[in-house]
Amino acid sequence: MIKFFKAVIIGAPASGKGTISSRIINYFDVKHVSSGDILRSNMSMNTDLGLKVKQYVNKGHLVPDELMISLISNELGLLKNNNWILDGFPRTKEQAEELFTKEPIYVALNLIVPFEIIVERVKGRWIHERSGRVYNTEYSPPKVTGKDDVTGEDLIQRPDDQPEAVMKRLEIYSESINPILDFYRKKGILKDFRGKTSNEIWPLVYNFLKNYMTPKAEFNQQIN
């Protein structure tokens, strides 16, 4: 076993990164680090870096690579004596290269779900707008079709969850992620996990991670 496990998790929108990440932190002693959470936290706390981020966000501009690297590096620096898995970063090859220089990772976990499966999954998603509660007509349907379980109010489907919009997002993702995947592939640390559902992918991830970390006592057994 290595001393401290460091990894990034990669996957297309709605590929199950959130589900897989939650299972990883449940089964292993590892911190889940979200780049989005780091951004929001620094902006809400008005840290020096957060104030700089606001200057770009308020203008609708992308946060520069150098600033993003500083934010992420600061957060990871607080986790020197912890296992961690980074979600939502890097988003460019330049970010991947800089991160690897500052925080060499052991593996890039790449979740591969067929795009047609993702489109089908997302188009069944319905939202309760005021609370943010999410339902799916296939996986977690509301008790009453089209109504929120708690309030009984109407559910909505976001425009970006329409099939055409989802496919466009997936095409953009493919174009942006390929240079990052190539970088990790050349480093010899890219690990692909293929499946149609998170339940198919999870046992593959679990058995792979056991090579790096010992599962928590209550989960120290084979998952089939």
Image (tube, grey):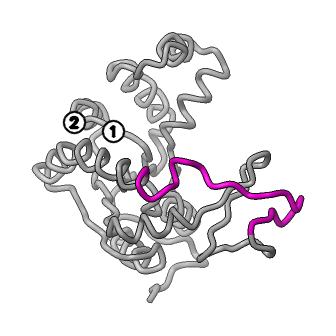
Q: CA distance from mark 1 to mark 2?
A: 7 Å
Look at the image and tell me whether residue 118 can be seen: yes
Against 168, residue 139 (above or below) is below
User: Residue 137 sits in which quadrant?
Assistant: bottom right
Which residue matches tag 2?
93
Q: For the point 15% across and 53% down, which residue is it?
A: 185
- Please give the name of the residue rendered at 66% of the width and 22% of the height, measured from the top-left corner: 44
- In the displayed image of the protein, which residue is found farthest to the right? 151
Q: Is residue 118 above or below residue 139?
A: above
Q: In the drawing, does residue 145 fall left or right of residue 217? A: right
For the residues bearing labels 1 and 2, Cβ distance under 8 angstroms: yes
What's under tag 2, amino acid-wise?
A: Lys
Q: Which is the main secondary structure of the residues drawn in magenta?
A: loop
Q: Indicate whether 9 appears above or below 23.
A: above
Q: Quadrant of the N terminus?
A: bottom left
* Rendered image: mark on residue 90: 1
Disc 2 packing (10 Å; few <14; some 14–19; many ≥20): some
The part of the chain drawn in magenta is: 146-165
Please give the name of the residue rendered at 39% of the width and 76% of the height, measured from the top-left corner: 196
Q: Secondary structure at mark 1?
A: loop
Residues 160 and 25: in front is: 160
